[in-house]
Amino acid sequence: MFAMMMKSGEKPDVFTYNVLIDACCSSNNVDEAKELFDSMVNRGFVPDVQNYNILINGYCNIDRVDEAMNLLKEMSHKNLVPSIVTYNSLIRGLCKLGRMPDVQELVDEMHDNDQPADVVTYNILLDTFCKTQHFDKAIAFFHQILVQGIWPDLDDVVRYDDWRKGGRPSWPETNIECGRLQTVEEIFRNLLVKGCHPNVKTYTIMIGGLCRDGLLDEAVALLSKMEDNNCLPDVVTFGTIISAMLKKNKSDKAEELHLEMIARGLAR
């Protein structure tokens, strides 16, 4: 496309370069994107933060974070102030590679530059603690950001589709498996008190934890509370309780829940 524009005598502007660079990065052709970036500079255009952000994110997506970090240094030399998007791309890339000391340096740099972290930053860090099984750090970090009045997006941290397809456990689920049901219950109560509405995945994890501890009445009560909070249980939610009921020889209650599933169109 760029070659066709040049051949026809059209002169791309900064916006056009942004579109072309982004298209290259989206298809992981980051070297071609860098060539376009250099071409833009050679033609006398001054790159802006958006230009750098696109290229930095492109490098991070293919694990070439050192090259992305070099671009961050280049921005500093050109007196360009990195945005939260710049930092989040780099933090995500570094976390993916497990380079936590470098992440800490970036977080410190953000603080020094009066660039506050946002919910995306916190989601990345929280998810990384969980992926690396630093659950105590994750819980402490969760409480820390609550104090700051920031609510992580639990849909990012608790990936329902991954869980249902057999992917890695979410951090609340893993904590329950490690015997930390009380801790997760505390976090769950905080969600409700602060006006944050847990999704079906979060409720199902809590119900599963209650069932594992033999607290079937509490699990059924929480099932009812889902309805009160306009969150409809799904097949996984019902299946969790029914399975627990059958293990405890509560076949009548299990059958009652199964009939309720049929009435809701969740089973035949």
Image (cartoon, rainbow, N blue to C red):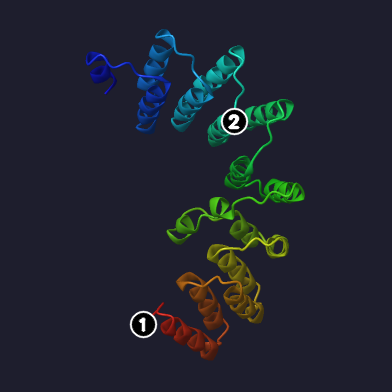
Q: Are marks 1 and 2 in contact (CB under 8 Å)?
A: no
Occupied quadrant, residue 183? bottom right
Label annotation for residue 87: 2
Q: Which mark is residue 88?
A: none
**Left or right position of 66 against 197:** left
Q: Is residue 136 left or right of residue 260?
A: right
Q: In the picture shown, does residue 244 fall above or below 201?
A: below
Name the amino acid type tagged 2: Tyr
**Above-or-below relation of 82 to 236:** above
Tell me residue 215's x, y (percent): 66, 77
Q: Name the residue that disc number 1 marks.
A: 268
- Residue 63 x/y as whole percent: 47, 29
Q: Residues within 10 Å of mark 1 (few under 14, many from 20)?
A: few
The percent coordinates of residue 244 (x first, y second) are: 55, 77
Q: Position of residue 118 (x, y in %)?
A: 64, 41
Judging from the image, what secondary structure is the residue with disc 1 in? loop
Callout 2 secondary element: helix
Tell me what residue is drawn at x 46 percent, y 28 percent: 54
Q: CA distance from mark 1 to mark 2?
A: 50 Å
Residue at (65% x, 60% y) in the render: 196
Looking at the image, which residue sits at the far right? Answer: 147
Asked where in the image residue 225 lies, by quadrant, the reply is: bottom right
| Quadrant of image for the C terminus | bottom left
